[in-house]
Image (spheres, grey):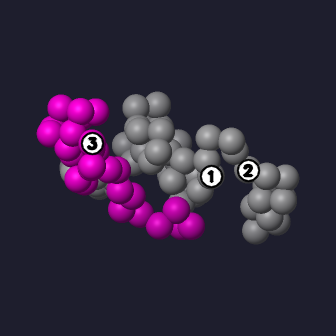
Amino acid sequence: MSAPQYAEKALASSSSSATHPHHGAEEAVTLNVDPNTLTVADLYDKEKFDLETMDNKLVFQLLQCGPEGLTQAEAEARIHK
């Protein structure tokens, strides 16, 4: 039995053709799961999400944060959920 597909890559057009070998297309990563329903166990299950090999943008989307992390208020709100 194969693991369910939670993320997929799609090609999105770009205005700059010099930056990508697909002649003006850049990869856009989309998330096929609601991050609000994820559990910590889901994130540690490498058959569902292998965070080490995933695109950083998708990891940030899963974690609902950016490269700078969470603000103190955001962290406290998550703790109290």
Residue 37 visible in the picture: yes
- Image coordinates for residue 73, horizontal then vertical, percent: 84, 59
User: Which type of secondary structure does the marked residue at label 1 adopt?
Assistant: loop
Q: Name the residue under label 1.
A: 65
- Image coordinates for residue 80, horizontal then vertical, percent: 82, 66
Within-10-Å neighbours for mark 1: few <14, some 14–19, many 20+: some
**What residue sits 41% from the left and 63% below the top?**
33
Q: Mark 3 points at which residue?
A: 16
Q: Mark 2 points at which residue?
A: 70
- Residue 28 magenta-drawn? yes
Camera-near label (2 vs 3) is 3
- Mark 2 is on which residue type? Leu
- Mark 3 is on which residue type? Ser
- Mark 1 is on which residue type? Cys
Q: Are marks 2 and 1 in contact (CB under 8 Å)?
A: yes
User: Which type of secondary structure does the marked residue at label 2 adopt?
Assistant: loop
**Mark sitting earlier along the chain (2/3):** 3
